[in-house]
Amino acid sequence: MIRADDIYAALVDAHRGLDEAESRRLDARLILLLANEVADAERVLALIEEARAAGGDS
């Protein structure tokens, strides 16, 4: 069984050795792949808002 900690560890490992620009491109590709997998535009938009609010960005 895969745990949330396993996913976090895989994300950290995927970024290892990447510079900031490469890391941002990886994040962008992953976000698009996950959004496609969810296949519910309303849910994806809600999650974008949730992530922005949780990050404290203004």
Image (cartoon, rainbow, N blue to C red):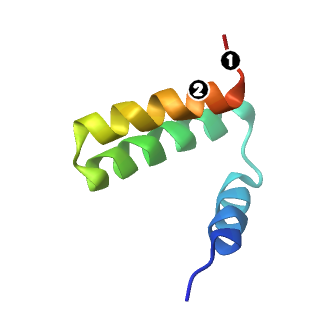
Mark with earlier residue (1, 2):
2
Question: The residue under label 2 is which amino acid type?
Answer: Arg
Circles 1 and 2: CB distance less than 8 Å? yes
Name above or below for residue 37 compared with residue 55. Answer: below
Q: State the residue at coordinates (36%, 49%).
A: 33
Tell me the SS state at disc 2: helix
Tag 1 residue: 57
Residue 8 lies, with reference to residue 41, above or below; the image says below
Q: Quadrant of the N terminus?
A: bottom right
- The residues tagged by marks 1 and 2 sit, at their Cα atoms, a distance apart of 6 Å
Q: Residue at x 37, y 41 (%)?
A: 32
How many marks overall?
2
Q: Is residue 9 or residue 55 the one in the foreground?
A: 55
Q: x and y percent of residue 3 in the render? A: 62, 77
> Left or right: where does residue 49 sit relative to residue 51?
left
Q: Which corner quadrant of the image does residue 42 belong to?
A: top left
Q: On the picture, is 9 further left or further right than 35?
A: right
Q: Quadrant of the C terminus?
A: top right
Q: Give the residue at mark 2.
A: 52
- Picture coordinates of residue 13, whole percent (x, y): 72, 63
Q: Quadrant of residue 47?
A: top left
User: Residue 22 got which mark?
Assistant: none
Q: Circle 2: is it few (<14), some (14-19), or many (20+) Cα within 10 Å?
A: few
Query: What secondary structure is marked by label 1?
Result: loop
